[in-house]
Image (cartoon, rainbow, N blue to C red):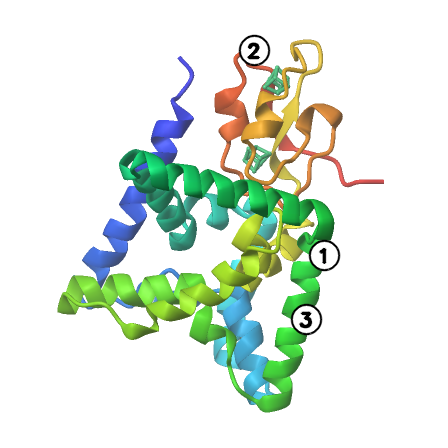
Amino acid sequence: MTPDLAKMRRYWQRAVPIAVVIAAWSGLPVTFCAVDLGILKLVCPMGFVECCLSTKTVVTRMLPGFVLSTALVVLLGRAFCGWVCPARIAAHEADSLISKSLPRPLERVRNAIGELRQRLHGSIELSWGDGLALTAGLLLGIAFFSFPAYSIFCPVGVLSRNLIELAVHIRLRWELIFLSVPLAAGLFFALGWKCTCPAGLIRGLLAKANRTLQPVVDLEGCRMCGKCVKNCEFGIRLPNGDFDSFACSKCLKCLQDCSQKAVHLKVLSRPDK
Ligand code: SF4
Ligand code: SF4
């Protein structure tokens, strides 16, 4: 029997925030950005880079945790983005809530904004490369001003801190307003705020070395219906053999969505020639 991946992912995405809340209640040092394992602190790769640049030192106490996080990204690709990231979970939940409860006239406004965005993207076409250029500029600024500016509006950090604040003190932090920075920047990108999230972009760069658990299409079974491409958040064209380890969040939606069962996970792929 094939496991229901969509259901598994939904349960997992609910279990992770619950685990963070339970950790907060128990006083354990666990957030979406770092997990303190006693002798080792698992840290976000972007957090480590930002810390080193803003202090102009290699923060050695964070180095083992950074190496471990990097190894996990090489091993699992951007699975954090697809299965753990609170910003993705919040965006998905907000989207389905809005779709279900939006009154008709407002739904028309929402569709009109969507169309406008699509037309805008048709003319400016900003994508991953532009997101990386923005991130490089941000990192230069952090190094120049010795100020960890990204922590202020990192969607993972902001949502993580707010979830813990809500669980422990039953209130939200005013810094939620900073989520508008990546959201507003994302309006100019065809793939939205995901292209403006440095935490995800850095993972994407590291995931270029990932060779495991990659979705591939068995062309004999494929009907070229295009459903997997349409439903992939990153528009990865698997049937064309265009797998992109930089972008893929290993959400496994393509496996779930293909009625022909033509998509499967390749445990180990050979490096590109
Ligand atoms: S959903 Fe399945 S059949 Fe359709 S294009 Fe993708 S792999 Fe082919
Ligand atoms: S290629 Fe498949 S696993 Fe990767 S992001 Fe797209 S739908 Fe998810």
Q: Which mark is residue 260?
A: 2
Q: Residue at x 24, y 50 (%)?
A: 18
Residue 268, quarter of the rendered image: top right
In 3D space, how far apart are the residues under numbered discs 3 and 2 (Cα atoms)? 42 Å
Give above or below for 41 relative to 92: below
Q: Which mark is residue 136?
A: 3
Give above or below for 171 relative to 82: below
Residue 218, quarter of the rendered image: top right
| Ligand 1 found in image quarter | top right
**Numbered disc total:** 3
Mark 3 is on which residue type? Answer: Ala
Q: Kindly tell me whether mark 2's CB lies below 8 Å from ligand 1.
A: yes
Residue 24 visible in the picture: yes
In 3D space, how far apart are the residues under numbered discs 2 and 1 (Cα atoms)? 34 Å
Residue 270: percent from left, percent from top: 75, 36
Helix, strand or loop under label 2:
loop
